[in-house]
Amino acid sequence: MVARVWHGYTTRANADAYEAMLTPELLPGLSSAKGFRGSYLLRRPADEEVEFITIILWDSLDDIRAIAGADYERAVIPEERRSLLTRWNEKAAHYDVRSSKVGPMSFL
């Protein structure tokens, strides 16, 4: 399994609107894509900004390439979301998942 990790930042004023665009699904149709295994959206205050981290789990880099294209490390950010970001990583990082354990989860 491969984790695709990306960081983006908003103003505090835009954080809730940006988060609303990402939930319940980071990208429309993503959950039905071949090789998709799950995703996490993380959020924290970072000085005057709010940092968001997305972690998307895939079976393989080939599955990521099928969604992101040949330049699969390039961040895929729809234009309507860019308007809410103050800055972002131009590239996503990819990690081999070596261990995983998730217990019961509940969300507000």
Image (tube, rainbow, N blue to C red):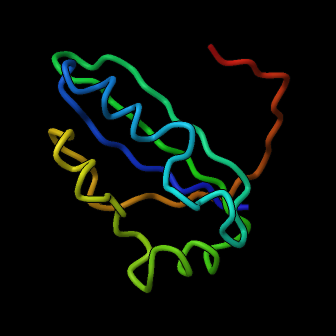
> Could you tell me which residue is drawn at 66 percent across and 18 percent down?
107
Question: Eyeballing the image, is 48 above or below 84?
Answer: above
Question: Eyeballing the image, is 11 above or below 30?
Answer: above
Q: Can you say which quadrant of the picture contains the C terminus?
A: top right
**In this view of the protein, which residue sits in the foreground, 80 or 62?**
80
> Could you tell me which residue is drawn at 21 percent across and 50 percent down?
82
Does residue 50 appear to the left or right of 72 in the view shown? left
Residue 9 occupies quadrant:
top left
Spot the residue most to the bottom.
70
Does residue 56 appear to the left or right of 49 in the view shown? right
Question: Eyeballing the image, is 107 above or below 76?
Answer: above
Does residue 63 appear to the left or right of 73 in the view shown? right
Q: Can you say which quadrant of the picture contains the N terminus?
A: bottom right
> Could you tell me which residue is drawn at 19 percent across and 19 percent down?
13
Q: Give x and y (percent) for residue 94.
A: 53, 61
Q: Give x and y (percent) for residue 23.
A: 51, 37
> Could you tell me which residue is drawn at 41 percent across and 49 percent down?
6
Does residue 21 appear to the left or right of 40 in the view shown? left
Q: Give x and y (percent) for residue 78.
A: 31, 59
**In this view of the protein, which residue sits in the foreground, 4 or 13?**
13
